[in-house]
Image (cartoon, helix red, strand yellow):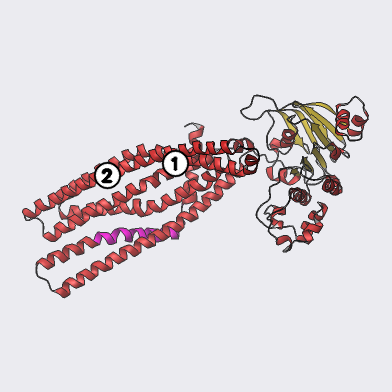
Amino acid sequence: MRPSDSRTSSSDTSLLHLLRPGRRPAAALTGAVAAVTALPLAAPQITRRFVDDAIAGASIRHLTMIALGYLGLAAGGQAARMLTAWLASRLAWDGSNRLRERLTEHTLGLDLAFHGRHTPGELIERVDGDVVAVADFVVAFLLDVVAGVLLLAGVVAVVFTVDWRIGAVLLAYCLLIGYGMVRAQRLAVPSAAGSRAANATLTGVLEERLAGAEDLRANGAGEHTVRRFHQTSAAVLRAERHDARVGTTLLAGTSVAFAAGTAIMLGLAAWTMETGALTVGTAVLLFQYTLMVRAPFERLIDQIRQYQAALAGLSRIAGLLAERPSLIPGTRPLPATGPLGLRLDGVGFSYPGDDERVLSGIDLTLAPGETLGLVGRTGSGKTTLGRLVLRLHDPDEGAVLVGGVDLREADPHSLRARIGVVTQDVQLFAASVRDNLTLFRPSPGDERLRAALGAAGLAEWADELPDGLDTELRTVSAGQAQLLAFARAFLADPGLVVLDEASSRLDPATERRIEDGVARLLHGRTGVIIAHRLSSLAKVDKIAVLDHGKIVECGRRADLAADPHSRFGRLLDLAGVSR
């Protein structure tokens, strides 16, 4: 077995485990399915009794009692079907919610290379849309597949007891129809998979365009966006049409086959009546059982589209669960307290699928408590170097060591607790201020939260919140969002801090207001500051200048600023910042 096959098999086993109900709910559902099967099987027996007794001249009272019995069975069958539907829906949604949680956790654990290949809209469709298809199928499977197969088996068994010749014909007919359905399903699954894939692509395109609506409108890219939407919608339409043609053809063929089967069964019943082997009531019974055979098959045909969608969804879910992060977690914890030293030893890196080197031959050392300013032109590799320090990527060459631990060997929980980051792209959630600060982890207490807000320069803003820390964040300015990111870093109390263009969204007045807060954040910690505003690097200990992925200059800031020929000194002059 190939490794990929092994992973897929493991994923399928995991899916079955997540969807499997508990013992008591499974027992209740089994009882309901048994009732759904048994009650309809008993109804034709009452019909035969009614017809034969009526022909024999039974009293109205006697026939009325038989009719009431039939009515009770019919009502009981409908009640059992409703109960089965309710139990199946509840169990399906319980299982699918567990599956959603598993998929979400797994997807969030995949590295940036994976997320770079898949749009958020596509992942939403795979995490939620495919799971909905699976949940719908589970309900349909229990109601129409399991109950239908049991009903068919019961019908064939009963007809065999009535007349073995008619039972043999009915069995052969059911096997022939079943074989045709299996063959048709093999043709139908690819069309359903293509339809779901086209819809996932459309969801991804819509998500990207809606997220960038402001830029698209401001830059006059609306015509291109509409054209792209039309192209993607046309692909969805073609896939849906093909899927619909396949489904309609299957349904029409099945209807013709059932009409022919019913005619054959009625002919056999009439022939046996002429020979005196069957009564009129038994002939009616056979006719009813023939109709009962048709009904489950028609339900199966109706549900084959959900079956196709579920197979496609399960395949895509298993494929997603089979994805493995390229960053293998280690087990070594980083030092639990104090500032963390940083060393990059011969680091080289290129993004997956790109042969161009982003970083090459990076050698850098920061003692615990030192701060480093990374400068260079756009595209020189500053942000990529910061991502390596955060272990969002692993280097292709060399090693990144924090606190003396190679990050490839570091325990991820320890790494996230001891290395903090503030970037220019701040993600805020539709939740309370408290949850946005703690990122939904247990709160360390309102006192610490308010202290973190105060350190980030948000004390007055926090005092004006209508519901205090329980106020739901709705609309905040870009500057306030950046300050909240600083407050998160204060709250985490890391040993190493990476500030990636962290003041890019702040106006000069606000930037000056939090300079003391940034100094407090870096005090007693190791810091890596990536900045275009060279004025924000006035108090760092060291400077490293990057150009085309290489460090072309590195040293103490004071020494580089004093050197009239240094690259950093020339950058200060060009920026109008005093040396």
- Crowding at mark 1 (Cα within 10 Å: few <14, some 14-19, many 20+): many
Q: Which residues are magenta?
A: 20-42
Comparing 299 with 178, the one in front is 299
Comparing 29 with 273, the one in front is 273
SS for dot 1: helix
Q: Quadrant of residue 305?
A: top left
The residue that mark 2 highlights is 254
Q: Quadrant of residue 82?
A: bottom left
- The number of numbered badges drawn on the structure is 2
**In magenta segment, residue 384:** no
- Crowding at mark 2 (Cα within 10 Å: few <14, some 14-19, many 20+): some
Q: Amino acid at mark 2?
A: Thr
- Tell me what residue is drawn at x 75 percent, y 29 percent: 380
Comparing 336 with 386, the one in front is 386
The residue that mark 1 highlights is 312
| Spot occupied by residue 512 in the image (x, y as percentages of width and height) | 86, 46
- Tell me what residue is drawn at x 87 percent, y 32 percent: 572
| Spot occupied by residue 111 in the image (x, y as percentages of width and height) | 63, 38
| Circle nearer the N terminus (2, 1) | 2
SS for dot 2: helix
> Is residue 501 something one can see in this rendering?
yes
Q: Amino acid at mark 1?
A: Ala
Comparing 478 with 23, the one in front is 478
| Spot occupied by residue 387 in the image (x, y as percentages of width and height) | 71, 36
The answer to whether the residues at label 2 and label 1 have Cβ atoms under 8 Å apart is: no
